[in-house]
Amino acid sequence: MPSYKNHLVFSLLIPILVTVPFFPNVFYLSLAVIGASIVDLDHPLRNSNLLLLALFGIILVLLLHILQMPVLIGLVLILLSLIFFISTHRGLMHSILGVTLTAALLTMFTYGSLELLINSVPITPSLAIISIFLGVMILNKKIVPFYVVLTFLGIFLISYAFFNVYYVFFAFFLGLMSHIILDMFTGRGVALFSPLYSKRFGKKMLILLISLWMFSLILFHL
């Protein structure tokens, strides 16, 4: 159990450390945490999360259809659950392609949800609702209460509420990649370029990834 607890702690801490130099904002940091956690939904032990994700996706599609509103966000949840369900653990969804696809789908959900909420709900509570909803759907149930409280307080009391779709994608992407980096420390490594290239990469690839992170950080602040 200690190794599991350590992995859980690092899966929360690392995405925050990787993302905070870009976005010292609780909303975007929460998205990075979501990204870091969703990667492991391809594990059979997380099938309950996938079922919950698919169920809420179906409910959203039906509800929005009845209200004659765009059903995109519901379809995105269903698609995400299906992709992770058919994926093997540390397979496609642990690759650059899988990370990019997941970040894009999560960004579509976040943007679509905000578009629906913003007409009747101010932006600050809208961002909190989106972050908390994703946390409940995706995170390990043991940490959901802490995540919900910290995210709620952080968005309302600390961060200035603003939305940038490119920042959303990048926050998800950084969170997802932070999990991939953690998995590269395991003996099995990660097939970063699957399905085009099946070779698995370990700690030696970290130097390149860290260099790319630093280069991106410089460009971002310039």
Image (cartoon, helix red, strand yellow):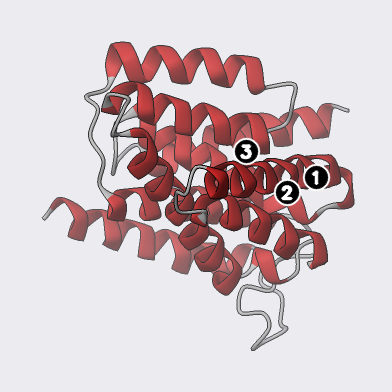
x and y percent of residue 141 in the render? 74, 25
Residue 36, relative to residue 144: is it above or below? Answer: below
N-terminal of the two: label 2 or label 3? 3
Q: Amino acid at mark 2?
A: Ala
N-terminal of the two: label 1 or label 3? 3
Q: Amino acid at mark 1?
A: Leu
* Marks 2 and 3, how far apart at CA: 24 Å
x and y percent of residue 170 in the render? 37, 54
10 Å neighbourhood of mark 2: few (<14), some, or many (≥20)?
A: many
Tag 1 secondary structure = helix
Is 9 placed left or right of 115 in the picture?
Answer: right
Say the numbered circle drawn on residue 51.
Answer: 1
Q: Give the residue number, with chain letter if any, for mark 2.
A: 54
Residue 91, relative to residue 52: is it above or below? Answer: below
Is 121 placed left or right of 18 in the picture?
Answer: left
Residue sitting farthest toward the bottom: 196
Mark 1 touching mark 2, by CB under 8 A?
Answer: yes
Tag 2 secondary structure = helix
Q: Residue at image x 60%, y 15%?
A: 146
Residue 157, relative to residue 5: is it above or below? Answer: above
Say the numbered circle drawn on residue 11.
Answer: 3
x and y percent of residue 163 in the render? 26, 40
Q: Residue at image x 78%, y 67%?
A: 87
Tag 3 secondary structure = helix
